[in-house]
Amino acid sequence: MTTTSTADATVENTDRRIRPALLTMFLGSFTLVTAEFLPPGVLTALATDLHVPEGVVGLSVSATALTALLAALGLGALFPRLDRRTLLIGLTIGAAVSNVVVALAPNIVLLLIARLLLGLAVGGYWSMALVIAAELVPAERLGKAMMIVNAGTTVATVAGVPLGVLLSTYAGWRTTFLIAAALTAATAVAVRLMLPPIAPSKGIGFGALGSALRAPGVTLGLVSMVAVVAGHFAGYTYIRPALAELLGAGPAVIPILLALFGIGGLLGNFVLGALADRHLGALLLVVPTAIGLSLLAIIASATFAPLAYLAVVVWGVAFGGILNLVQVWVSRVLPDRLEAGSGLVVGGFQLAIILGSAVGGRGVDSIGLAATYAFGAVAAVLGGVLIRRSLTLAAH
């Protein structure tokens, strides 16, 4: 009895130390993602104040995604011996500086330069997040740990960005970015206080990225992940015009449908994150298929409108959990090169955002919304089949 009680007390004390660290990582993902996607929400006011077309302001998101991709792939290699907690503190401070510069920017050039700095912070943070979580919890609990970290992204999408847009309506977009800077600076302090020192993992550097890509199933899995995520963004980037054109949804209905997507995303993060450790193989097939079927259901809702309400919830649930799944996937296929694998996953995710938005835009202009959604659905389902296959290849 005494031995059992002592063991239980040890687990409880360990959990008490881990929870604040994971909640700090949640705070970081929330503040960074909120800052990353604020510009579209304040697009018109920002463009008016800086005297540039709205399309030019839209480049601020693309610039962030591009440097995030580069940072995810190369930042760990540039600092191979630096304690990862220290690196994380530097990245969050960089994000805070970026937000301050955006808030004070007198022209679009300085704003875009500041957004490049934010991209470095976003890509670096996400490439380190899985590595840090793996140091905090046992391998069999990694999915649940990343569920907490990734919840910050979902909450930022559902609440952070809308609240930022609401604040900008009353206080202005510059004040909104200053508040984002303050929250990010607070995150840097929390990282210093709540996270233990984290040594760099094995298998880092540019050579390790190439070695990781040659491991069984890894390249196939990454290409498949890009297909799934790009298929999603080919549809989601143009969800407003799709709902308006295909469903005939008006200004009063579209916000409700988008809110349902966000609620689904929050549920998906927690439910699928909780299941990822034990049911990874099945979920790698089921979740991308759900994304594809949801895209097709949006098309079908043109003839049966209620289907759209179910479709956006299922779509949100599926996409809300996809990042958890690929992070657990890479921990299975590259358990000894986790930092390199995490960088490849985050880089692939950012590439998929760029490709999905670009291909979707070209498709909408050339073949129409319905055909573009069908194309995205095929990419998502095919990606799910192949990434499930990659897990089998890695196991042999």
Image (cartoon, rainbow, N blue to C red):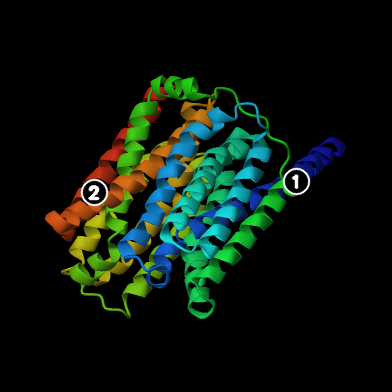
Q: Which residue is mark 2?
A: 359
Q: Residue at x 40, y 44 (%)?
A: 66
Q: Are marks 2 and 1 in contact (CB under 8 Å)?
A: no
When the figure is inspected, residue 256 is found, relative to residue 91, above or below; the finding is below
Q: Amino acid at mark 1?
A: Arg
Tag 2, which secondary structure?
helix
Which quadrant of the figure contains the C terminus?
Answer: top left
**Could you tell whether 280 is left or right of 81 in the image?**
left
Tag 1, which secondary structure? helix
Q: Which residue is mark 1?
A: 17
Residue displayed at 48% across by 65% down = 161
Quarter location, residue 182: bottom right
Tag 2: Cα neighbours inside 10 Å, few (<14), some, or many (≥20)? many
Where is residue 372 shown, x and y percent of the image? 19, 54
Residue positioned 57% across, 52% down in the render: 95
Residue 71 appears at what percent x and percent y? 49, 38
